[in-house]
Image (cartoon, coloured by chain):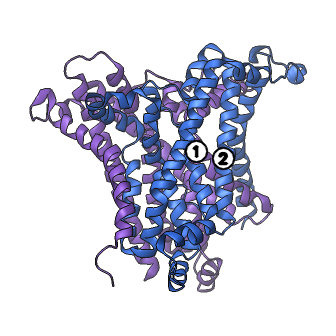
Amino acid sequence: MGIVVKILRTIFLVLLGLFFFVPLLAMARFAFQSVPVVLLTPEKLLEGWSLAGLFEVFGNPEFQRATLISLQLMVLAILITLVLLLPVAALVEIRAPQLRTAMTAITLLPWVVPPVALVVGVAATFRSTVPWFLASPYSLVPFYVLWALPFSYRALDAGLRSIGARTLYEAARVMGASTFTIIVRVIIPNMIGAIIAASVLTAALVLGEFAFAALLLKETLPTFMAEFQRSEPRAGMALALSVMLLTALIIWIGVRALRKRGMDLQAAGV
Amino acid sequence: MRRRFDTATVVVAVPFLAFVGLFLFVPTIGLAIKAFTPGGSFGFSAMQRALEGTYRTAFINSLSLAVTSSLLGGVLGLLLALSLKSLTRPKWLRSTTDSWSAVAAQLGGIPLAFAFIAAIGTQGLITKLLSLVGVDIADSGFSLSEFWGLVVVYLYFQIPLMFLVMMPAVGGLKSTWGEAAAIMGSSPGRYWRSVALPLLVPSFLGGLLLLFVNSFAAYATAYVLNPGAQLVPLQIRFLLQGNVITGEQDLAYAIVLWTISLLLISLLLIAVLQRRTAKWASS
């Protein structure tokens, strides 16, 4: 490879690295340094750093309420995903592999109806028939399960295939175990990595979803964040950065859980 | 081979399908019916009006934004994958980029918009740094709330997504092929034209469509940067929250139905491309 190409490649990689890193750095500075950017001079670079903004958010009762709701939505979405999806994924893989194409297609459909689109349909159908359902913040849960499907199903499916679920099933079957026993005592313990990945990807989605919650006027962590930043720019920025880093950490845990077993997640969901 | 499905599969599949049916199909079909029955009787007027005037502008803007950010993100993501393939040192770079891309492809929404405001907004850190060396971002006509501003922010998740899509295909290019081509007297240009590119094109096109689907209906980032932008997702918000003037609701249904159709077509094209690739790879 020519030296020119090598230099160009290095410049490209450095620029791209800056593009990804600098916004986070700027965010951290804005959040944790109490020096307005107009007054910032080289001498003042190390002045006025503190975590006060973040602590200010933690004490905010509205923040606590919104966070509690988001955490509850997260736990419920993960539980429903595992209870509803895991058995189907497992049985399709071990007893009805001819249905795999259908499952792949069904679990991709939520991509076609993004939150900002489905919210209109939900308002049109559920508001007139079951108004009590949309009144509760927990009504968000099934939809979050739905949008996580392209990721959660692929994570579980990758797990099932990498452990050779069908072989395990047949071996346990020959030894006289029931299907239920096999799934609970053989399949699930062997695919904990994939289960963690499916869970954390669902969690990341719940922590980030804004459109659906905002348009249904529900207060979750993301909708609180958008409102809060308007009145408290610094504290709001601190909160946004923390949520971003937390989400990054959560996804990273998921990716690691999969890669440890030599699996990879097509983040695209395709 | 078993033809009938066994009881256990049916028992677990029925609740799952009922769930998807109730929360995805019922609202979508309900919406489609309403889009075609404006004012209570069957007709195409709402579907037609959804593509006129300001809504037409919104569709054109959203399409340009999605296409531009997909093309740029696609090319840069592909270049990133190619750069890392030929790079063996430092070792950590490859694994860091892998993990970071998996994370960044999912980042978006509210915090991402804030990050760019802190960096290149009117009071941003980079804006300030550049003004010290005499470059005025605002004077150059660049604004985060305008088209190119949104493109730059979208690139933050589009580039890593394309990188993830292209990595397997780029990794599949064996260095021995390049050597074989060279031994047979072909130039590097000829190798790229005749061997490497044809191999990468299907994944690249599929990736572009995926990036398009990913960005067309993105809401949160655009909402923070410019809530009044003439973009389809923000127009939907406007119609949904606006006064209930007769016919306005029908318009929202129609706009959403057009959006869903567009995304569905993109996803079907992705599926077709993938089948092609799979067939080619196995033959």
Q: Quadrant of the N terminus of chain B?
A: bottom left
- Of residues A156 and A134, the one drawn nearer to the viewer in this rendering: A134
Residue B143 placement (x, y as % from top left): 56, 24
Q: Secondary structure at mark 1?
A: helix
Q: Which residue is mark 2?
A: A250
The residue that mark 1 highlights is A203
Pick the residue in front: B175 or B240. Answer: B240
Q: Mark 2 or mark 1: which comes first in sequence?
A: 1
Q: Is residue B72 above or below residue A69?
A: below
Q: Chain A takes which shade in the image? A: blue
Residue B75: where, in percent of width, then height?
Answer: 54, 53
Q: Amino acid at mark 1?
A: Ala
Task: Say what amino acid the circle numbered 2 marks.
Answer: Ile
Residues packed near mark 2 inside 10 Å, few (<14), some (14 to 19) or many (20 plus): many
Q: Quadrant of residue B165?
A: bottom right
Task: Give the letter of the chain under mark 2.
Answer: A
Q: Which residue is drawn at the image coordinates 30% and 24% (left, top)?
A: B54
**On the image, which quarter does residue A240 sit in?**
top right
Pointer 2 and pointer 1 on the same chain: yes
Label at residue B23: none
x and y, in percent, of residue A133 in the image: 37, 32
- Check disc 2 and report its element: helix, strand or loop: helix
Q: Is residue A151 visible?
A: no
Taking the spot 90% from the left edge, 20% from the top edge, the residue there is: A43
Q: Which chain is purple?
A: B
Question: With respect to residue B13, does B154 lie above or below?
Answer: above
Query: Which quadrant holds residue A188?
Result: bottom right
Pinpoint residue A50: horizontal percent, then vertical percent: 83, 22
Kindly check if marks 2 and 1 are in contact, taking CB atoms under 8 A apart as contact. Answer: yes
The answer to whether one can see residue A175 in this image is yes
Please give the chain letter of the residue carrying mark 1. A
Mark 2 → mark 1, Cα distance in angstroms: 8 Å
